[in-house]
Image (spheres, rainbow, N blue to C red):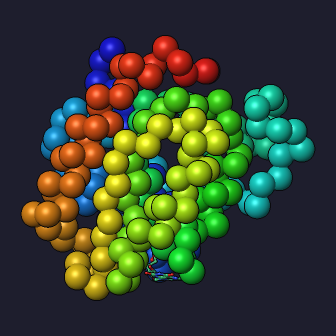
């Protein structure tokens, strides 16, 4: 396999979000780390309405262009990092909606979760997403938690930190370990 594709997905979709700055930091770090071909994917650019496919995604008989685009994007990935905010002690609704749209496209692919928030650092968002990952056989590899209080986004830039770089390195190492063993299990 040539370098596997890692998609860093910006899971916040609201105007004025800080997600893109944090995702850009991870994207730059992962690109320098050089184990993956890294893609930055903005969930907002798919403009997914609340799930509106008439058939179960397991059938992959999609009616809508937005679903076909989203499916083609997720299919391309060998691994994911979700960069996701904590909203009301959980993960944001746009993340769940985007996950629910698809099925086989996710299965047996490794995923890292980068959660961010205030004092809770996105921990509750991460923990609450895990049962959904297991339903879709997304294989959880590692977490990163970011406190926007300790490390704020300033003028659109997330500075990261030495500790976060250690966590990011560990996440990338764990993800890459899973890519080859999981590949034969994936359904396309
Ligand atoms: C609807 C909403 C609910 C939030 N709930 C929490 C929360 O439960 N815990 C937390 O740490 N931060 C919470 N926050 C603060 C967010 O973590 C912070 O606003 C962050 O910037 C949101 O990510 P985004 O800007 O990329 O959308 C909430 C923000 C919003 C908009």
Q: Is residue 73 visible?
A: no
Q: Total marks drawn? A: 0
User: From what the image shows, is residue 3 above or below residue 69?
Assistant: above
- Picture quadrant of residue 3: top left
**Which x, y percent locates residue 133?**
56, 46
Residue at the image position 70 percent from the left and 49 percent from the top:
100
**Which x, y percent locates residue 95?**
59, 59
> Quick one: 41 or 147, which is closer to the camera?
147
Residue at the image position 61 percent from the left and 50 percent from the top:
132
Residue 106 located left or right of residue 151: right
User: From what the image shows, is residue 135 above or below residue 51?
Assistant: above
Q: Is residue 187 visible?
A: yes
User: From what the image shows, is residue 69 above or below residue 96?
Assistant: above
> Quick one: 39 or 170, which is closer to the camera?
170
**Which x, y percent locates residue 80?**
43, 42
> Quick one: 36 or 112, which is closer to the camera?
112
Q: Quadrant of the C terminus?
A: top right
Residue at the image position 46 percent from the left and 61 percent from the top:
126
Residue at the image position 27 percent from the left and 55 percent from the top:
26
Residue 45 located left or right of residue 103: left
């Amino acid at each position: 396999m040539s370098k596997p594709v890692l998609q860093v997905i910006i899971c916040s979709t609201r105007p004025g979000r800080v997600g893109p700055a944090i995702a850009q930091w991870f994207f730059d770090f992962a690109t320098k780390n050089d184990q993956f071909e890294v893609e930055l994917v903005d969930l907002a650019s798919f403009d997914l309405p609340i799930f509106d496919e008439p058939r179960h995604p397991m059938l992959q008989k999609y009616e809508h262009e937005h679903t076909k685009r989203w499916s083609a994007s997720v299919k391309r990935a060998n691994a994911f990092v979700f960069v996701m905010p904590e909203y009301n002690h959980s993960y944001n609704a746009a993340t769940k909606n985007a996950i629910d749209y698809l099925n086989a496209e996710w299965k047996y692919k490794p995923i890292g979760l980068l959660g961010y928030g205030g004092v809770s650092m996105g921990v509750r968002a991460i923990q609450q997403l895990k049962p959904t990952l297991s339903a879709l056989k997304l294989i959880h590899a590692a977490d990163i938690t970011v406190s926007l209080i300790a490390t704020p986004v300033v003028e659109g830039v997330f500075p990261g930190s030495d500790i976060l770089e250690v966590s990011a390195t560990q996440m990338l190492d764990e993800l890459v370990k899973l890519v080859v063993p999981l590949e034969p299990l994936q359904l396309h």
